[in-house]
Amino acid sequence: MRIGFMVNDIASEEAAYSTTRMAVAAINRGHEAWVLSAGDFAYDPDEKIRARARHAPGAKYTTGSAYLAGLRGPRARVERITVDDLDVLMLRSNPAEEVSKRPWAQSAGIEFGRIAMRNGVIVLNDPNGLAKAMNKMYFQLFPEEVRPRTLITRDRGEIKEFVKDQGGRAVLKPLQGSGGSGVFMVDHASTKNLNQMVEALTRDGYVICQEYLEAAEEGDTRLFMMNGEPLRYKGKYAAFRRIRQGDDIRSNVHAGGSIAQAHITEEHLRIAEIVRPKIVADGMFLVGLDIVGDKLMEINVFSPGGLGSAQKFEKVNFANGVLDAMERKLEYAVHYRRNFSNIQMATL
C-alpha cells in the first residue's frame, strides 16, 4: 500500500505526533509512507496531481525519533511522486496553524485532495467534509443536545448580554483557532476586563461565547472515533483525559494541561452515537471528540492528536488499528473496483 501523509510542515513534526506514529506503523508493515507538506503539491499540464515528498530510508523503526531523523536526513528518498498513484492520501494538516502566516496553505490539502480522489485515491478525511469544517462553526451543526449553549458574534453588547445571562461566567474563544490559543474565562472577578478580551478576539474575527461547564474543572476526555465508531483496538478504547493545571481553564496538553487514563462511560458512548450520523455523512474517517461531562466541547476532524497518550495508558498501539482500517479500505476498493464514493470509502 502506498500512503501519503500531508502535514503542515515536515520540519515541525514531532516524534510523539499521531501522524508520525501512523507513518512508523505503515513502514513497519512494509507499506510506503510518503510525507508531504502544504506547499509541495503541483497540478501538472497532463492533469495529474504530483508532489515533492520524502520517504524515510529504513525498513523498520522502533522509535518516532529515529524515523524523523531518517525522514529529514540526507539518506531520505526525495521524489516528485504522482499523488494520483497513491492508494491513500491522509490529510493531517491543521488549517488553524496557517491563518496568520500562510493563509494560502489552509485549504491546500482539500483542493488538491479533491482532484486526487476523482482519480481513485482514497482521501482521508474526505476533502469536501473537511471544507465544511474550516472553522468552529461546523461544531454548531451537531445536535443541540450535546453542545454547550453558544453565541457567535462580533458585537460587544451581545457578548456582554450573553455573559450576564450566564450568571457572569462564560468562555470566550476565537471562531478559528486550536490548541487553547486565545481562550478566555470570564467570571465575576474578570468582567471588568471583558472589553479588553473582546477587543483582542474580534481583532481576528468572530467570537465564540459558550456557557461555562462546571465539569470542565476536572478536565475533558479525548475519545477517538474511526469509521463513525469509537476507536477500539484489542478491546481498548483510544481515549485519555486532559486535566487543567492551576487556574488555567485550558486542558490542552501544549497549553499546560496534563494527561491521565480515561474511563469511558455510557455517557461518552451516548455522545459518540449522537454525533455518529453526521461524521459518517461527512466522510470523517478519524476524529477526536473532546467531552466534558455530558457535553461535547469540541470536535477535531483535521489532525486529531493523542494516539500516543492513549497508548501510554491502555498499552496498545492504536496506530496499528488505524492501519488495519486503511488496509481494509484498499481491499474493498479492489474487490468493488472502486465503485464507492470517497465519502463512503472514508467510513467503511
Image (cartoon, helix red, strand yellow):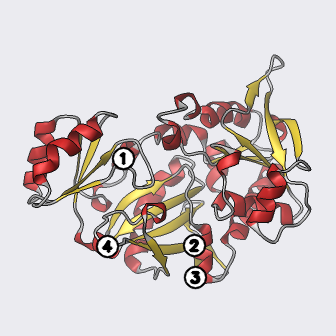
Q: Is mark 1 on a helix, strand or loop?
A: helix
* Vertical arrangement, residue 75 with respect to residue 241, above or below: above
For image coordinates 27% across by 36% down, the residue present is 202
Q: Mark 4 points at which residue?
A: 246
**Residue closest to the eye, 237 or 315:** 315
Q: Residues within 10 Å of mark 2 (few under 14, many from 20)?
A: many
Q: Name the residue under label 2.
A: 309
Q: Which amino acid does label 2 sit on?
A: Ser
Instruction: Please say if the residues under marks 2 and 3 sit with CB atoms less than 8 Å apart.
Output: yes
Q: Mark 3 points at which residue?
A: 313
* Residue 121 picture quarter: top right
Left or right, 251 with reference to 156: right
* Residue 63 picture quarter: bottom right
Q: Distance between the residues labelled 2 and 3?
A: 7 Å
Q: Mark 1 points at which residue?
A: 141
**Closer to us: mark 2 or mark 1?**
2
Q: How far apart are marks 4 and 2 (CA)?
A: 21 Å
Q: How crowded is mark 4: few (under 14 residues within 10 Å), some or many (20 or more)?
A: few
Indicate the position of residue 329 as horizontal and vertical percent values.
74, 56
Indicate the position of residue 175 as horizontal and vertical percent values.
35, 42
Q: What residue type is labelled 4?
A: Gly
Q: Residues within 10 Å of mark 1 (few under 14, many from 20)?
A: few
